[in-house]
Image (spheres, rainbow, N blue to C red):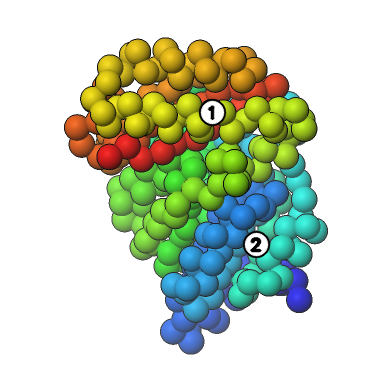
Amino acid sequence: MTPPIIRSLTDLRDQVTTWKRAGETVGVVPTMGALHQGHLSLVRAAEQDCDRVIVTIFVNPKQFNSPEDYEAYPRTEEDDARKLSSFRVDAVYVPDGPQMYPDGFATNISVAGITDGLCGAHRPGHFDGVATVVTKLFTQTMADSAYFGEKDYQQLQVVTRLAKDLDLPIEVVGCPTIREEDGLAMSSRNLLLSDRARIWAPELNRAMQDMAEGLLKGEDFNTLKAQATARIAAANFTEVEYLELRAADTLELMTQADRPARLLAAAWLAGVRLIDNIAVG
Ligand code: PAF
């Protein structure tokens, strides 16, 4: 059976209040829909930890950099509900635009520092949009825990930071990236890839894996980066926005893998922006 869909905040609050009165814990999996195995792994983690599970689906206009990108984002609500039917999901919260941002909405949540580089540098305002909507989803669902994929590594750090800074009574749980067999990180944006581009796409991850190996052997960062960039370009990617080594916790820039680090990349393939990151050391 597909889980019940809740569209109004009042109904959501009534439902969660009933659960909480019964002493039940609530987990939330915030999504923008177009659910794939990556999202479903977050649902599985929430199921294991919590008595009640809410999946939210809201394509958040505030975190897109262009109206075209927002319009092109896949919307597959019926399919999503069907995919959730084999899980113990108690509610799918699907607010509409005015429910989230009513007339007169004027608040912006902005996390400084860790949003400066990487996606933050290339997508102005993106993390303000994410931080604002996630804060609302946390307070709307009153969840005890929230589940995010490591695939969006900078987002996970931003959300962890804001929950801590604002004393939000919620635990932010990061879950490993789920990959296709050929290594491509699962993403709703993969649906936008043509058949040919889909064949080229895993080269990003392969180049990153080899670069990580080189870094662990102590090879020079800039040489490895130049090799990886050339390889990604040879696989028909048109632009590598960034390919950087950063501290796993603070996202500080690094050039040597002498402490836990993350290699992070964003690159464009046939008009689709793909991101990936892997642990190094
Ligand atoms: O990762 C996403 O899908 C979105 O950024 C999120 C966390 C649901 C906020 O809109």
- Location of mark 1 (residue): 204
Rendered residue at 48%/26% (across/down): 207
Q: In this view, does 216 lie to the left or right of 131?
A: left
* Left or right: where 192 falls relative to 149: right
Camera-side residue of 273 and 170? 273
Q: Mark 2 points at which residue?
A: 93
Crowding near pointer 2: few (<14 within 10 Å), some, many (20+)? many
Which residue is drawn at the image coordinates 76% and 64% (left, top)? Answer: 82
- Report which quarter residue 91 is drawn in: bottom right
Mark 2 and ligand 1: say if the CB distance to the nearest ligand atom is below 8 Å. no
125 w.r.t. 148: above or below: above
Does residue 235 appear anywhere in the picture?
yes
Q: Nearer the viewer, residue 81 or 132?
A: 81
In the image, residue 142 sits, relative to residue 277, either above or below, namely: below
Q: Is label 2 in a helix, a strand or a loop?
A: strand
> Residue 17 versus residue 74: which sits nearer the camera?
74
User: Residue at 62% across / 30% down in the picture?
Assistant: 201
Mark closer to the chain start, 2 or 1:
2
